Image (cartoon, rainbow, N blue to C red):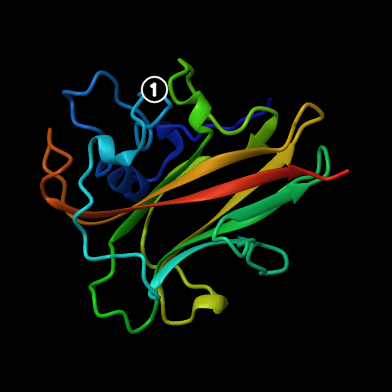
Amino acid sequence: MRTRVVSWQSASPLALLALGLLWLPPAQPALAYPPAVGILGKARNCLACHADDGPWREDANLIVDLLDKETGKSLREKDGSFLISARPRQSRTLLIVLGRAEGDDAPPPHRNGWIFIDPALIQRDHLGSKFAPGWEVDISASCRLVGDVHEAYEGAKITALSMTVRPTGAAKDAAVEWQILMTAGEAVKGDATRGLVQSYFERKVRLKVEE
């Protein structure tokens, strides 16, 4: 499976700063890129180290969306999950959009971190992505400073980043968790619960191989 892992050597100083604010504290058994959920670490989700004490809630102002980059259409289903479908070896480029709508009373987050992960693989020792087996993905985890724009969310405080997925010939229908952490403030070294205000969200993403 061709999985591209972004290395720290190629990251910009600004990206490294943003990623550093979501590192696990040194007391943890492993540090990983980002966050340490199922990559080098085996934490079940972000809440193993981060608090959920931020002002951002599951309300009408919350933006958690996955768009088809070519058409701009949301992949959200009626039940709130997302569906990514593709033919074997067909690449689909998506746009991950996270943030708060225009007019939200709460101050916006400064950065958004996220990971797509097969929960059945979290405890497996493996260096790299733990996306669904048989599915290639270029960026399964990242962290980004708020400040992007998109025509579908005019005036919103968001991050927007592309992600390309591709089912191989061995891919099967599957599901992954989309774990999201919105944060503001500055981290305190050695304690991921101090210095930051943080809100955690989770979505289900279904992967379907088209005939």
- Residue at 36% over, 55% down: 112
- Residue at 12% over, 37% down: 191
Q: Nearer the viewer, residue 87 or 60?
A: 60
The crowding category of the residue bearing disc 1, from other C-alpha atoms within 10 Å (few below 14, some 14 to 19, many at least 20), is many
Q: Is residue 19 left or right of residue 39?
A: left
Q: Quadrant of residue 77?
A: bottom right
Give the position of the N terminus as an image quadrant.
top right
- Return the residue at label 1: 40
Where in the figure is residue 85, as x and y percent of width and height? 74, 49
Give the number of callouts.
1
Q: Is residue 192 left or right of residue 44?
A: left
Is residue 38 in sight in this rendering?
A: yes
Determine whether 102 is above or below 13 in the image.
Answer: below
Determine whether 127 is above or below 10 in the image.
Answer: above
Q: For mark 1, give the secondary structure.
A: loop
Is residue 138 in sight in this rendering?
A: no
Where in the figure is residue 48, as x and y percent of width and height? 26, 35
Q: Amino acid at mark 1?
A: Leu
Where in the figure is residue 160, as x and y percent of width and height? 49, 61
Where in the figure is residue 180, as x and y percent of width and height? 39, 50
